[in-house]
Image (cartoon, grey):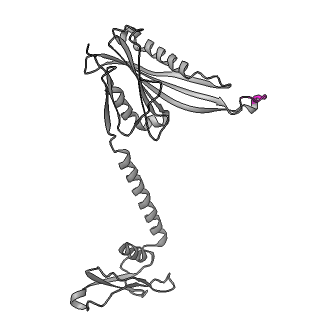
Amino acid sequence: MSAFFMVFISLLNPLQVDVTMANCLGFRPPSTSVATVFRSPVLSSAAVLPPSSSASCCFSISCNLQSNQTKAFEVPRRNLMALILSSCIFSQIEGNAAFAQQSVEFREFIDTFDGYSFNYPKNWIQVRGANADIFFRDPFVLDENLSVEVSSPSSSSYKSVEDLGPPEEAGKKVLRQYLTEFMSTRLGVRRESSILSTSSRIADDGKMYYQIEVNIKSYASNNELAVMPQDRVVRKEWDRRYLSVLGVENNQLYELRLQVPENVFVEEENDLRRVMDSFRVNKLSA
């Protein structure tokens, strides 16, 4: 830290710095302590750095302030400050980029009783008591979560996910289900929704899965009881993306659900798609 401070002082003031290294044992008595002294025309007096008793070598720094002598290192103060600020900014950017590139660790969840499995981010926590077969959520982004819904074996007899029709028809059913669940009795609440994509894929287990992506926005008035329309200002409450993966096994319909705010989805899309691609439905043993 002291070396950086001395270099910083030398940059602020055009100084010639001569550094002489002397072996404490060879040239000075062991009891002699050495302090580093530097002077600056900006400071009212000389600055003295305290001696270090554990140092194996002693440094004597003499600063020549004669204006007619050659300056070893000279940087205008305005340019110096710009250099320091730009260095700090680029260091911060590089640190953020390295943090963003860190790979997310995943953990596998296997439900042998109901017959499904998937991978989820290792830092997500399980929430018990939620109205789902299983529920995980991000510990920091509370609106980001994962759940699995399984149809009742007594009231369903699915043979394939194609029983839902093509992916486009299945997407409409999924969206209607979401809107029904988010139905509100509050005055002035309005929902906007759209189907973003529908697709089907054959996984490595040989089964077909449907993938549905929808967007739902919720708007509400800040004063729903106001008489005058100008007093009922509508604002957006939330903007979320819902990702669903549908599969059929054991005559049941399985649905993996992911909920994430749209602004978070942009940052975590690759990780969320890894969760979707990992979803499998498994045959239960008799």
- Residue positioned most to the left: 26
Please tell me which residue lies in front, 32 or 202. 32
Assign the N terminus to one quadrant of the image. bottom left
Q: In this view, does 81 lie to the left or right of 190?
A: left
Residue 51, compared with residue 271, is above or below; it is below
Residue in view at x 33 percent, y 81 percent: 52
Residue in view at x 42 percent, y 27 percent: 147
Please tell me which residue lies in front, 250 or 269. 250
Q: Does the magenta stretch include residue 42?
A: no
Asked whether residue 124 appears in the rendered view, the answer is yes
Asked whether residue 74 appears in the rendered view, the answer is no
Q: Image quadrant of residue 169?
A: top left
Which percent across, then down, holds residue 63? 38, 85
Which percent across, then down, holds residue 96? 40, 50
Residue 72, compared with residue 121, is above or below; it is below
Residue 248, compared with residue 138, is above or below; it is above
* Segment colored magenta: 224-229
Assign the C terminus to one quadrant of the image. top left
Which percent across, then down, holds residue 189? 64, 25
Q: Is the magenta stretch mostly helix, strand or loop?
A: loop
Q: In this view, does 179 lie to the left or right of 60?
A: right
Q: Is residue 33 left or right of residue 12?
A: left
